[in-house]
Amino acid sequence: DARVTQTPRHKVTEMGQEVTMRCQPILGHNTVFWYRQTMMQGLELLAYFRNRAPLDDSGMPKDRFSAEMPDATLATLKIQPSEPRDSAVYFCASGLVLGGFHNEQFFGPGTRLTVL
Amino acid sequence: GNSVTQMEGPVTLSEEAFLTINCTYTATGYPSLFWYVQYPGEGLQLLLKATKADDKGSNKGFEATYRKETTSFHLEKGSVQVSDSAVYFCALSDRGATNKLIFGTGTLLAVQP
């Protein structure tokens, strides 16, 4: 049963520390998305990739956030330095786009980040 | 630009009641439409989808019909169960190369025994 995996599932850190979240998309998917979910803002798209190339990261605070895909099996989201307002659940999702036909996105279980 | 509007929650129902969660959209062209569900402590899961006008998506007793004339994709279920308690998100996928999803704000459903 193919699924998106994310690590860690929970992370508690102190303000100013670097945080790295990892995602393994479903094998064969060619798009990867990072979302952030909070009670106040709901679900926000931070960045997305197609064929490992970043297509849009306009939803991401550039000064402290960075997203990469070192290879097709790994996507990373880094926050440096972290701040208490970054506390949220971060979801990774992957999907397959073929010839403009839109299949659904498959979400991982999320990383719950708490910045003290 | 493209957007999705869904009814605010929480929606509180008794078990076996009829459920409707309204969703309307604004889009250029012909988007695909989706309902996702998020159970407590989990990620979003696809519940159902429709890719063209008049299509009906269905799954686990839930249904939604793609209505182009009213730009709507309302979610319905004839008899809800306690296990249906979750947050429901309506979403559309813009036609293009990105497969980007645009989500509504989510509607919390609480079903009481």
Image (cartoon, coloured by chain):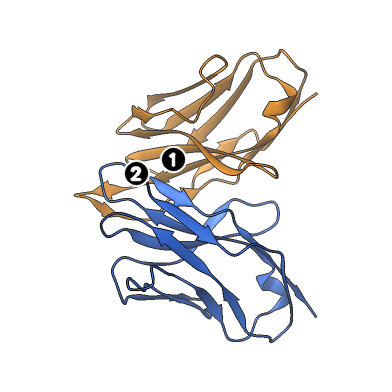
Using a 10 Å C-alpha cutoff, classify the residue at mark 1 as few (fewer than 14 neighbours), some (14 to 19) or many (20 or more).
Answer: many
Secondary structure beneath dot 2 equals: loop
Q: Tell me the distance, in whole angstroms, between the alpha carbons under discs 1 and 2.
A: 7 Å
- The mark total stands at 2
Residue A9 sits above or below residue B51 on the image: above
Comparing A71 with B13, the one in front is B13
Displayed quadrant of residue B72: bottom left
Q: Is residue A75 left or right of residue A44?
A: left
Query: Is residue A1 among the parts visible in the rendering?
Result: no
Task: Say above or below: A75 vs B82.
Answer: above
Q: Amino acid at mark 1?
A: Pro
- Residue B50 in picture, x, y percent from top left: 36, 68
Q: Is residue A90 left or right of residue A17?
A: left
Circle 1/circle 2 CB separation < 8 Å = yes
Question: At label 2, which amino acid type do we have?
Answer: His
Q: Residue at x 60, y 46 (%)?
A: A109
Q: Chain of mark 1?
A: A
Residue at the far left: name it. Answer: A99
Image quadrant assignment for residue A13: top right
Instruction: From the top left corner, tell me how far across and down residue B107 is, in percent.
Output: 63, 62
Q: Residue at x 57, y 16 (%)?
A: A64
**Callout 2: few (<14), some (14-19), or many (20+) C-alpha neighbours within 10 Å?**
some
Label the orange chain with its letter. Answer: A
Residue at which label 2 appears: A29
Instruction: Identify the residue position indicated by label 1 in the image.
Output: A25
The x, y position of residue B94, in whole percent, is 33, 50
Chain B shade in the render: blue
Quadrant holding the C terminus of chain B: bottom right
